[in-house]
Amino acid sequence: MFSAMLGEAWHAMGANRLRTFLTMLGMVIGVGAVVLMMAIGQGAEASVKRSISAMGSNLFVVLSGPPNVAGARSATGNAPSLNVKDANAIAELDGVAGVAPVTMGKAQIVFGSNNWNTDILGTTPSYLDVRSWYLSSGYAFADSDIRSATRVALIGKTVAQNIFGDDIDPLGKTIRIKQSPFVVLGVLDSKGQSLDGRDQDDTIIVPLTTAQRKLFGNQLPGSVRQIIVQAESDKAMAMTEEGINGLLNQRHNIREGADSDFSVRNLTAIANSAAETTRTMSLLLGAIASVSLLVGGIGIMNIMLVSVTERTREIGIRMAIGARQRDILMQFLLEAIVISIVGCLIGIGIGVGGAVLVSIFTKTEVIVSTNSVLIAFSVAASIGVFFGFYPARKAAKLNPIEALRYQ
Amino acid sequence: MQKNNIEAKTVIQVSNLYKDYQTAAGPFPVLKDVNLRIENGDYVAIMGPSGSGKSTFMNILGCLDKPTKGKYVLDGHAVATMEENAVAGVRNKTIGFVFQGFNLLARSSLLDNVALPLVYSGIEKPERHKRAKVLLEKVGLGKHINSRPNQISGGQQQRVAIARALVNNPRLILADEPTGNLDSVTSEEIMALFGELNQEGITIVLVTHETDIAEHAKRQVRFLDGKIVQDTLTNSHSLNEVL
Ligand SMILES: Nc1ncnc2c1ncn2[C@@H]1O[C@H](COP(=O)(O)OP(=O)(O)O)[C@@H](O)[C@H]1O
Ligand SMILES: [Mg+2]
């Protein structure tokens, strides 16, 4: 009985292909949009999560320069207000697990005939600890390298790829940074993208003193652009932030109420709010896409109502030869469900295909989860039932004599 | 069709039946105190001028409509008190309908058209097709089972409709002007088919306003203005006025 009705539904759909196709199109677009938007949203969430866990935990960054001109500060070249002594003092504070002063700049590097322009980070060995950054080969430089400002370098994966290629082992090789020779001590593990979308593997780390004296030779000896501070625990974050502010205000002779010449940023909080933002964005994308599902459902209802009117006589005939009300109800309901499910399957195909194309052409991460497909599928099926029910009931409630007389 | 013999002897028993249509101008009486009994194996032609209430009466006999007042017992069941699903079951199994306009499903093959009532009796597809095929052969359309209704003539369509009416082995065939859309030669063929079916024991009630068609029936009932005014046996010509 059921299979016979399914056959009938299929048959009825085939009877007016163009109309069935157009009705289905609403569903196809709706489901496709939901699947695609969820894939993009979940991909964004996943890549943010990965950036966060790659960043290291419980981190602050102390930036030199007043807090209100944040973005423009480092580019203008005014002398950094922080120095290594500040970093050493912060390390003594309660609740601080590690401190790494950092100075940075861009430089051209050369190996053989290969050129590459990359970020150079001058810092201390503790930088790798606070960032939880490991070496995939070789070893890190030590405090002795800081003292004697040796020309050694740790290179990121992207840098290694671009100047050494696959065949040459970078360890022990000499590269030139701003013309001076540096020996490659180690290759850094891959960190992937940072929250702001930079490739963190496109980096070279050198001893802080080497960077200061031999690469970027700056005005005030010992000054740094930023200090990375790791708190001992999540709970120690607030106390640590207060401690840093108090300590630096005192060291920099900044009176209460006056503008400070540094700013403390809670990287963990920024990361969490970035994660929150992507989550909201992916929800919003899903919600917008769902509206098209709803529109698709209304399209189905519309066509089913037309179909019931057109087939009034057929309904009368069926009733006269023994169809019960629930048989007629099932027939039209099934038709609506079949249309929405077939549309949904096509939509899933298109959504997944679209997601693959997006990931190929924009190089952003997309994730098609089984969950999102299941959700789209069950929502589409429910829409079929919901919007198909009213027309089907209308058909089932027809008076057989009037239906038979209908021209 | 042997099974009919062991069932109730009276197929239709209508007593003091009234039917009013509700119109904007109030109730409009169409059937006024109709009484009729039809025995098993009978063959009745209902006649009368247009508008005299024949179709209304047939719709009530076919359980497509309910009387305003009065009693209708079909095959031992008081139809008025039956619930909707049971009535659908009666339409499916006890009655076979034949309409003036054939009323076949245009999109379905002849085989599917004939098999359709069996879908609603919950019979599986192979059996449905087997029985439909037998009946299409019986009405002389065994070669056209995969055609569509619009590919065959009106007479052939009416044969398909009769095959469909027969597919569930009904006791009773109700036909409202089955030859109304057919030429006289084709009409004769259809009437011959009804005659055969009646020979096999099926009770037949048909509406017509052509006397030569009515001559095929064993009994002729005449309606006038919502009342039965005449009830005669065709062959014996014995008058049996019900005035
Ligand atoms: N649904 C209806 N509503 C109101 N009046 C109707 C309806 N159906 C039929 N009638 C009227 O009832 C009368 C009998 O109709 P009908 O039974 O079709 O007659 P017949 O079949 O004998 O020509 C006619 O006057 C017709 O106009
Ligand atoms: Mg009539």
Image (cartoon, coloured by chain):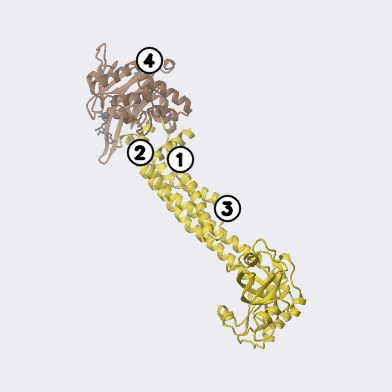
Chain colours: A yellow, B brown
Q: Disc 1 to disc 3, how far (Cα)? A: 28 Å
Frontmost of labels 3 and 2 is 3
Q: Are marks 1 and 4 in contact (CB under 8 Å)?
A: no
Is the Cβ of the residue at disc 4 closer than 8 Å to that at disc 2? Answer: no
Q: CA distance from mark 4 to mark 3?
A: 66 Å
- Circles 2 and 1 on the same chain: yes
**Quick one: label 4, few (<14), some, or many (20+) residues within 10 Å?**
few
Work out which quarter of the rendered image holds the C terminus of chain B and state it.
top left
Q: On what subunit does the disc labeled 3 rest? A: A
Say yes or no: labels 4 and 2 on the same chain.
no
* Mark positioned earlier in the residue sequence (2 or 1): 2
CA–CA distance in space, label 2 to label 1: 15 Å
Q: Amino acid at mark 1?
A: Leu
Q: Are marks 1 and 4 on the same chain?
A: no
Q: Which residue is mark 1?
A: A334
Name the amino acid type tagged 4: Glu
| N-terminal label among 1 and 3 | 1
